[in-house]
Amino acid sequence: MRGGGQKVFIFWIITLAILWYITRKGVNKGLERLAKFAMPAIYIFALALLIRALTLGSPVNPDWTPIKGLGFLWSPRWNELSWSATLAAAGQIFFTLSLGMGIIQNYASYLKDEDDIVTSATATASLNEFAEVILAGTIVIPITFTFLGTEGLKSGVGLSFIALPNVFRTMAGGPLFGTLWFLLLFFAGITSSIAMFNYLTAFLEEEFGVERKKGSTFVFMMYVLGGLPIALEPVLTKTADLMYLTELDNWVGTYFLVLLGLIEVIVAIWLFKSKGLEEINKGSYWKIPKWFYKIVMSFITPAFIIILLVFSTINYVKNGYFKLIPDFALGTPKLIPWVIDARVVLIVVFVLSFILTYRSISQKLDKENGRK
């Protein structure tokens, strides 16, 4: 491994080590301390960048201004609306709110009976989307539009890690604001990824009695094994296509998140029925009305997700995602093994998760039946 690949690998291991250290310290000494520092820092950095973004003027082109960049961001382009875009948006929302992956349930398990679930849920969703959509969008889009125009906004993932760094090199105060930008991304990434890391560690601790320090070390090693291909692929193939990551994201980052989110809705609303509403409203200052629970949460929400999944599945079939070798990988034979590797990892993780979950539920049911 040389050059960029080596640096990516080193910083990836450092990040995993930080996650491991925070998780092994526990919820109070680890996660809470991180949140108390990182969350305010994210908003402080974002506000500083927001002020700078809106005061850039038009240094490159008179028609490229921050305000016009905001106009591009918030002006609807109905011709670009598609089921693929809708699935991607839903996957992003589900991911950032930790829905469809069991993480939000893990955090919710720390709540007490008298805690306000409605206010907590509303605050979580509102603050998260405010930071991600309002603040982040109002920072990234105006800066990029001001220096690169509409073409710069088509950079995709490269927008944050390639286009913007080049912009920060040329703008006044660029080194300072570039540093704030990457610190913001770092804290946002750490606070998001720690959720999954802690969830897996807590599962091992609570369900199988694995001591937290040992459990966090085991999860660390599993992360290294599962993510190693992402670091190795560009080095061994001499390309930047990242087929392994693309295939994982096609399924885990979008499709399966929405599918599992639907299952969560069905379990929480349809199986628990009125008891679910009682648990939500218990201890809550604002109560969810019964009509909202029955109409919006019981019918409209699952119906929309089902419709989205049906049309998204049709698109996946048309695009060849359900084939043994997906269409997008056929043009580059040397990348096909990385796609297969991603699918093997998905199947192994799914089977292992199913077995562990089934065993955990069975043990709890046996204990309950034993008490009776």
Image: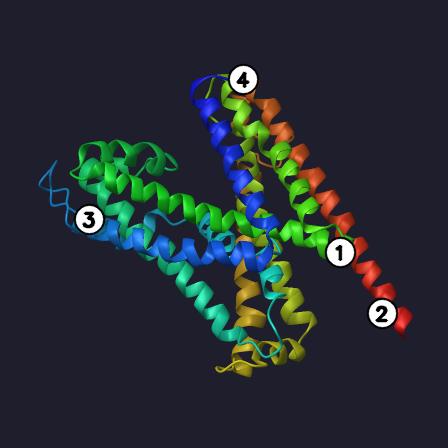
Q: Position of residue 226 (x, y in %)?
A: 62, 34
| CA–CA distance in space, label 2 to label 4 | 53 Å
Residue at the spot of label 1: 207
Residue at the spot of label 2: 368
Amino acid at circle 1: Glu
Indicate left or right for 200 with 171 as reference.
right
Element at label 1: helix
Residue at the spot of label 4: 236
Q: Of the residues tagged 1 and 2, which is closer to the observer?
A: 1
* For the residues bearing labels 1 and 2, Cβ distance under 8 angstroms: no
Quadrant of residue 270 within the rendered picture = bottom right
Amino acid at circle 3: Arg
Which of pointers 2 and 4 lies earlier in the amino acid sequence? 4
* Residue count near mark 1 (Cα–Cα under 10 Å), binned few <14, some 14–19, many ≥20: some
| CA–CA distance in space, label 3 to label 4 | 40 Å
Q: Position of residue 347 (x, y in %)?
A: 70, 38
Q: Of the residues tagged 3 and 4, which is closer to the observer?
A: 3
Which of pointers 4 and 1 lies earlier in the amino acid sequence? 1
Residue at the spot of label 3: 52
Amino acid at circle 4: Leu
Residue at 19% x, 37% y is 147
Which mark is drawn over residue 19?
A: none
Amino acid at circle 2: Glu
Indicate left or right for 11 with 77 as reference.
right
Element at label 4: helix
Element at label 3: helix
